[in-house]
Image (cartoon, rainbow, N blue to C red):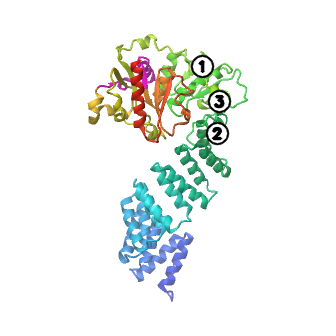
Amino acid sequence: MNLSYMQGNMSIDQAFLMAVQFHQKGDYQEAELIYQQILKVQPTHYLSLGNLGLISAQLKKNEEAQQYLSQSTAINSNYYEGHTNLGNLHFNQGQYEAAVEAYKKALSISPNDAEVWSNLAATYLRMEKDEESIICYQKAIEINPKRADLHNALGDCYYILKMYKNAIKSYHNSLRINPNQIKYCHNLGYAYQNLGKHSEAIKYYQKALNIDPKNISLHVNLATALLLTKDFKNGWVEYEWRRKLDQYRKFSYKDFTPGKKIEGKSILIYAEQGIGDTIQFMRFIPLIENAAGDITFLCPKPLQLLLEDWCLFSDRVKIISEYETMAKYDFCLPLMSLPYVLGIGGISEIPIAFPEQFSTDSSRMADFKKIGSGIDLKVGIVWAGNPNHVRDNQRSISLVQLNPLFNLPSCTFFSLQVGDARNELYQKKNLHFSTSIEDCGQDFGNFWDTAKIISKLDLVVSVDTAVAHLSATMNKPTWIMISANPDWRWLLNCNSSPWYPSVRLFRQKELGDWEQVISDIRKQILKKREK
């Protein structure tokens, strides 16, 4: 439309109202035209400048948006919406300090706007200023206590700070306002699970699934809670939902599921998730290889040499570490689905991990001379796992936390640590004790190298890592430090493991309290040394 809206008898207020109507309909071009015509007549019309800034922001023209919004608030420093929109613009660009400044200016003009308090809280959360974020969400809730999303956001802040009881209270508040919101049920389940109240977690996961029965994440979280509480029968069924996740590896072969006949059929069994998972679950392969034809096991490359050396399976199992694109299989199956396919319904049905088949005294291992045969107790240590693991903040520790162990008499310590955490051995602050620790990890090229070290040790002390699984599978005495909120495989209220006879679990009594765990380990090493 080329007609000038400012011609004729239309006032600025009438033209502005018409522009707003176009703006609200999403006709940004027509709205922008009118705002510009208003500014030709009245250059200080800050409302038009502000709305031009909003249109520019909506069209991702960020520099132009900032210019318009800054002009509007310069003309009228009490232009509340201008400061708010400027804060939103800065927030969306990751300019959090500037966003805080803009939101604070808006609140100084209108302190009772719950939305702006919420925006300020979200900004502080991005800046990892969690306590400030909590204060802002509390203020927003004080203004508008019936907004379920604010209670949920406050719960998220408490959850980040591991204040799970407070998080649960906030999530309950959100659910009372909106009882059919899946996210609130899911959050409650997850908070209860982290607090160690697993029956409550299961209750809210199931409540959420009643609302959205095809929610993949809910099924997977329910599975871990069921497995942790020894409900293997239902847990394995729920755990199959993980295969629907977008990031899950897909093959073009038919899935092998319970009830399918596999006599004489070829099957590709492929490892998934971490190396520790692979070590733990490969024990199920012999249970299926007798019924099937040929089996190909696609394992992580760092494990291939070790598995070939150990001869864990019959000749009908081919071990590969790279997918053979030209190979043809009748079925494929992820390794961690074997318990489901085999119908493993209880702890008593878990097979022990190859206790008689490891040749740890093979000629290749006997050639390794790094560890002598002195009278000292030889203890391997691992203090950190994969930093990218979703639960790493609950399972890894720092080397310095193990310091109380290193002055134990008649004990020699060998680091099996790899990755960036191995550098802690050489940090200046640790040198007063770390120089007495033998750094074996520098020689590791794969897990066969790790295994040959473990074979020479008397004991392995580790956090929940692949090395712990390896050591335990070798039937080496393995003491594992476990969070009060453990991974499902370590179950609850026990210091032994049905997966590994040689494992002893040292559990936190309070979430995050590793000092007590390490103190218990120190006492037990002293007892072991006395014997």
SS type, badge 2: helix
Determine which residue is flagged by label 1: 317
Q: Residues within 10 Å of mark 3 (few under 14, many from 20)?
A: few
In-front residue for pair 374/234: 374
Task: Give above or below for 213 relative to 178.
Answer: above
**Mark 3 or mark 2, which has the lower sequence index?**
2
Residue 346 is marked as 3
Pointer 2 residue: 238
Task: Using the numbered discs, state the Cα–Cα distance from disc 3 to disc 2 in whole angstroms.
Answer: 15 Å
List x then y, in percent, for residue 455: 44, 17
Q: Is residue 31 left or right of residue 236?
A: left
The span shown in magenta is 436-460
Q: Nearer the viewer, residue 471 or 252?
A: 471
| Rendered view: 370 above or below 28 | above
Circle 1: is it few (<14), some (14-19), or many (20+) Cα within 10 Å? many
Q: Position of residue 421 (x, y in %)?
A: 37, 34
Residue under the point 35% across and 21% down: 411
Q: Is residue 358 magenta?
A: no
Secondary structure of residue under mark 1: strand
Q: Is residue 491 left or right of residue 526?
A: right
Disc nearest the viewer among 3 and 1: 3
Name the one closer to the observer, 386 or 289.
386
Q: Which of the marked residues, 1 or 2, is nearer the chain's N terminus?
A: 2
From this view, report whether residue 58 is shown above or below residue 361: below
Question: Which amino acid lies under the numbered mark 2 shown in the image of this protein?
Answer: Glu
Instruction: State whether residue 449 appears in this view.
Output: no
The quarter holding residue 236 reads: top right
Question: Which residue is drawn at the image coordinates 35% and 24% (left, top)?
Answer: 413
